[in-house]
Image (tube, grey):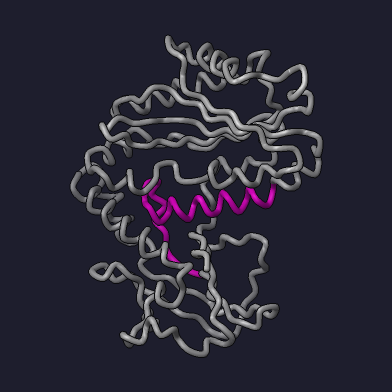
Amino acid sequence: MSEPKEGADDFCIAPILPAVSSEIQHTDVPSLSDLSKRDKPWDKHRGNADRVQGYYWSSSEFRDYAQRVSQCSQLLQFNLVPDKAAGELRLKLTNSRFCRVRHCPVCQWRRSLMWKAKAYKVLPKIVEKYPKHRWLFVTLTVKNCPITELRATLQHMNQSFKRMTLRKLWPAEGWLKSVEVTRGRDGLAHPHFHCLLMVKPSYFGTNYMKQDEWVELWRSCARLDYNPILDTRAVKRGKQPMQLIPELLKYCTKESDLVADQEWFLELTRQMHKLRCIATGGILKDYLRELEQEPDDLIHGDEDQERTEVDEGSLWFGWKRLEKKYRMVDH
């Protein structure tokens, strides 16, 4: 059996919450991850949030962030939602408190889920309106930089990208750009852009750009004295760009990098303050404008599902820091 996908907000309890799995008979108080393998990510993300909270407490500069992260997602409410087609009840997250600190692992995860949900909903409409257009996935990089120079490096990359969109060779009629920053083993920051580009059908004819032409274009626009590493991939004809959404709208910085080194993390917070990680342009801007903003709702990931009140009740789970688990609580 395949492992459940991270980020699901619901799980099946067949057929009417009849019995808890034998895995949890060792305790009188079941945990969320005991009841649902698909909800194991909650334990991981909240556990990493505890570490981030500790990093923030260590610096008087970030005590406010520490306080906010400490109160984030301490209590989760799930409603029991009937799934008539499957004849089961599902748990659906309906209430919690989120701190919205950019580098809180829980909020970063939830934010990514909301962005993906919006993109999955909108992109099919774009494909329907522009059925003959094609799609490219382009990754733009520069050399690694000290973490203390990350802000200046990202600002330079953003200016370079803007110059590139104004060049005659620029083939995209619309684009979605996201920022990712990873940590090298030597502690240097590796900033790069992931870009989804919508191009005319003629791009794959006389207007086609080879890999070395892309490298030269980015090198020129970024005013580099070396050939940067750059990757371009075309979405095959008949395939949908939705398959690229997980790579485009994942975390700005993966959690393993957030918790790897305290001083690096604190400097990352300083360097990334108020920098925008997602940008859209061209034809896609009107469709994907919401992705440039903080999601209003970090609870409901399934935008397509009708949110109806049900009478089957709800379950509450509280975070147990010493155990690093969410366990069922009375509320």
Location of residue 216 with respect to 29 vertically, above or below: above
107 sits to left or right of 47: right
Q: Is residue 281 left or right of residue 124?
A: left
Q: Is residue 213 above or below residue 106?
A: above
Corner quadrant of residue 106: bottom left
Q: Is residue 116 magenta?
A: yes
**Can residue 312 be seen here?**
yes
Residue found 45% across the figure and 67% down from its top: 39
x then y, percent, for residue 108: 43, 50
Percent position of residue 19, x then y: 48, 89
Furthest toward the bottom, the residue is 18
Is residue 285 rendered to the left or right of residue 109?
right
Tell me where the magenta segment starts and ends, as one range: 94-122
Q: Is residue 243 above or below residue 196?
A: below
Magenta region, main secondary structure:
helix
Q: Residue at x 81, y 39 (%)?
A: 131
Q: Is residue 280 at all visible to an observer of this figure?
A: no
* The C terminus: image quadrant: bottom left
Q: In percent of the image, x 74 and y 23: which residue is there?
A: 203
Q: Quick check: 79 left or right of 146?
A: right
Q: Residue 171's image quarter?
A: top right
Count the labels in the image. Answer: 0
Residue drawn 78% across the image and 23% down it: 202
